[in-house]
Image (cartoon, helix red, strand yellow):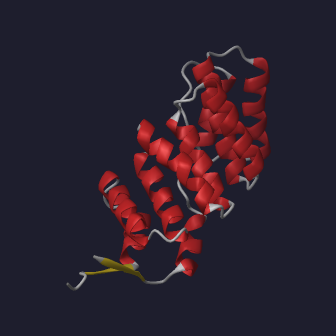
Amino acid sequence: MKFLKGAGAAAIGLFLAQAASAQVFVIGSGLGSECYDQTKSAYASFRSADAVCTRALREEAMTSKNRAATYVNRGVLRMRNGDYDAALADYASALTLKSDLGEAYLNEGAARIYQKDFAAALPPLNKAIELGTIDAFAAHYNRAIAREQTGDVPGAYYDFQIALELKPGWDLAESQLSRFTVIPETQ
């Protein structure tokens, strides 16, 4: 099969702003749990939400799993605020504590996409998929964006298809797939 993409890089730019990210649930109560809640909801103020997460990391005794989750959640807040380097530092801290945390890899890949470093986004997204991240649909969607931007159009098409299979009716994946034309190769 031969793949032709339709709308091209301009369409990708429209979807980068919505690259999927994942929060990580924190067990128990306290600041770490509040950080998760702030990250998951439409918080009123980035500064306030970031402060809750930072206080949780500084002041609260947590298991390494909850501490890693809190780093991921703070990283998501920072990524949404456009501070990709701080977000990447938080994801790295999370992975130092819990190297099998697929959501940290998923979010690292998303941050690299926002930075338009598509080649660097692929290894963490591959790892997120390998580890079975809870948000596998988002990992495949993000990897599709990175693949298309690095020239792997068939790989992008298949990842968009998988994202849609994992989250049926997802309009972002449907929109991306509608840009592709698949032509059977002639012998």
Q: Nearer the viewer, residue 77 or 129?
A: 129
Identify the image quadrant of residue 171: bottom left
Give how far across and how far down residue 177 sits, in percent.
37, 72
Q: Is residue 31 left or right of residue 126?
A: right
**Quarter occupied by the N terminus:** bottom left
Q: Nearer the viewer, residue 61 or 111?
A: 111
**Quarter occupied by the C terminus:** bottom left
Residue, x 54% and y 68% (percent of image)? 150
Is 27 situated above or below 41? Answer: above
Q: Residue 70: in sight, yes or no?
A: no
Give how far across and how far down residue 69 sits, in percent.
60, 30
Residue, x 64% and y 45% (percent of image)? 76
Q: Is residue 183 left or right of residue 175?
A: left
Is 16 situated above or below 58? Answer: below
Residue, x 59% and y 73% (percent of image)? 13
Identify the image quadrant of residue 154: bottom left
Is 20 situated above or below 4? Answer: above
Q: Is residue 133 left or right of residue 85?
A: left
Which residue of the protein is positioned furthest toward the front in this rendering?
187
Q: Is residue 80 left or right of residue 27?
A: right
Give how far across and how far down residue 5 sits, in percent.
42, 80
Q: Residue 141: in sight, yes or no?
A: yes
Identify the image quadrant of residue 15: bottom right
Give how far across and how far down residue 137 sits, in percent.
41, 51
